[in-house]
Image (cartoon, rainbow, N blue to C red):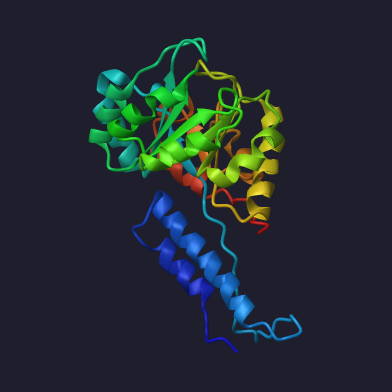
Amino acid sequence: MAGAFNASQECGSILGSDDTGWGRRERFDNLLVACELHLRDASRGDGKKDLPGRYSIYIIQAMAKIAPSILGADFSRLGDEIASCEQAGISIYHLDIMDGHFVPNISFGPGVVKTVDRLTDHLLDVHLMLSEPEKYFEPFAKAGADYITFHLEVHPDPTKYAEQLRQLGIKPGISINPDMPVEKVLPFLEHFDLLLLMSVFPGFGGQSYIESVTPKIAAARDYVDHHHLHTQIEVDGGIDRNNARKVVEAGADLLVMGTGFFGVTERKSLVNEIERIPARPSRK
């Protein structure tokens, strides 16, 4: 019989700690692994579990997080906007880079990313909506990006580009637009830390969430769990407090919000509201 293991006590320790964002998520992930190992070690030779009542195992699913899209911020007071995010408990920021070619709009470059990096110690999630994203991997890495995501539509065989990003010390992400079948990207997820599912066609803010993306989120969640991957699922486009629940319940880890976040006065309340949404139980 394995030694005593109190998962509920460990869970309470995590929730009561100062850890936020993905630091807390990592601790929850470690707890899940510990639960699995404990159950395995407590198994008898016939494969049945021999656990008395006091060995209560609670499988914990980490909470979803908001990644505010910097494009939705007031750039005339960017420092104040970032400070407001920090006070609300934000731990990751989303930065959309557009080239006017892959998408019909132009946003900003490494200079703005570097500025945001100076304003926060938290993670920067850089989304390259570019026709030739690999040309800009290094400039954005040097600017402070922690995650860099590019599109499968641009590079249908993306594996070597994921490796290029890892060599720069960057966690790679892969994205698809709403009209691409999610099955196209699933076989590549083992090479990526982040899957970004667009729930609007990229290029402009303020669009409505495309409902057909919801089953794609669920399919991606099934695949990630079934294959025991650590790929985070991020969803971007038309998300606000009115539809966040269905996105989280479908399996999303990160919700990108532009106007849905920066247009809200009580931002801390919104963050707490999203974090309280029960995530879909893992099927690992």
Q: Nearer the viewer, residue 261 or 65?
A: 65
In the displayed orientation, state which residue is furthest to the front: 160
Residue 277 seen in the current view: yes
In the displayed orientation, state which residue is furthest to the bottom: 1
Placement of the N terminus among the 4 image quadrants: bottom right
Percent position of residue 145, x then y? 35, 35
Q: Would you identify the image quadrant in which residue 269 lies?
A: top left
Q: Would you identify the image quadrant in which residue 138 lies?
A: top left
Question: Is the residue 225 above or below the residue 193 in the image?
Answer: below
Count of number-bearing discs? 0
Left/right of residue 177 with respect to residue 274 in the rendered view:
right
Q: Would you identify the image quadrant in which residue 126 lies?
A: top left
Q: Nearer the viewer, residue 84 or 168?
A: 168
Residue 270 seen in the current view: no
Placement of the C terminus among the 4 image quadrants: bottom right
Left/right of residue 202 with respect to residue 95 in the rendered view:
right
Identify the residue at image location x=58%, y=77%.
38
Question: Is the residue 85 above or below the residue 101 in the image?
Answer: below
Percent position of residue 129, x then y? 48, 21
In the displayed orientation, state which residue is furthest to the right: 46
Question: Is the residue 177 above or below the residue 166 in the image?
Answer: above
Identify the residue at image location x=64%, y=56%.
282
Percent position of residue 27, x then y? 44, 61
Percent position of residue 70, x then y? 38, 27
Left/right of residue 118 with respect to residue 126 in the rendered view:
left
Q: Nearer the viewer, residue 222 or 184?
A: 184
